[in-house]
Image: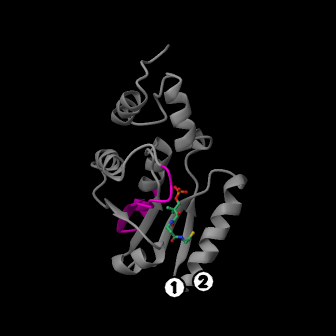
Amino acid sequence: MTTAVYPGSFDPVTLGHLDLVERACRIFDRVVVAVSNNSSKKHTFSVAERIAMLENAVRAIPQAEVDTFSGLLVDYLKHQKATTVIRGLRAVSDLDYEFQMASMNRRLYPKVETVFLMPDEQYTYLSSSMVKEVARMGAPLDGIVAPFVARKLRLKFKTPVSR
Ligand code: PNS
């Protein structure tokens, strides 16, 4: 049984994240989508809200499960008996940060391998922060987040859809 952990803030989950979960599930038997509960980082949605949106989003993917972790990712990997981390690479600009993170994780836990997956090219430009920016301005969110996530964003920012 191969297990991979896909960690992130998921604030909120986008269709780009879901594309990655689906790809990871084609490679690994079990994919744990792990929502970071890092109190030093300012998030728009609470951990409970981020988990609820993710659980709804991966409901149809049997190998995927959602969990949360705090502290070091490598400690969480040991807890899950996993040595593989999934991360998305959208563009070269992601590489610097991802390289640092993967190298630090490997230093802390030499057994760790980070597997980088590319999302479908329609999601290359997508990020949770950009989604929140357009949601705040009331722009349509079709094709970038799931409909229930779009509803949560509208409620959070109190923005009606402008078309
Ligand atoms: O979606 P994000 O915000 O890019 O995810 C970053 C995340 C949560 C994967 C990263 O910050 C993380 O692993 N945090 C846990 C703390 C940790 O292990 N730090 C050392 C390695 S960078």
Q: Quadrant of residue 146?
A: top left
Q: Residue at x 35, y 68 (%)?
A: 29
- Residues 35 and 66: in front is 35
The amino acid sitting under disc 1 is: Lys
Q: Residue 132: within the magenta? A: no
Q: Secondary structure at mark 1?
A: loop
Q: Residue at x 42, y 18 (%)?
A: 160
Indicate the position of residue 43 as horizontal and vertical percent values.
46, 48
Indicate the position of residue 92 as horizontal and vertical percent values.
72, 54
The residue where tag 2 is placed is 107
Is 30 placed above or below 80 here?
above
In magenta, the rendered stretch is 23-42
Indicate the position of residue 97 as horizontal and vertical percent values.
66, 62
Label 1–label 2 contact, CB within 8 A: no
Disc on res. 111 = 1
Q: Residue 36: within the magenta? A: yes
Residue lying farthest to the top in this orientation: 163
The amino acid sitting under disc 2 is: Arg
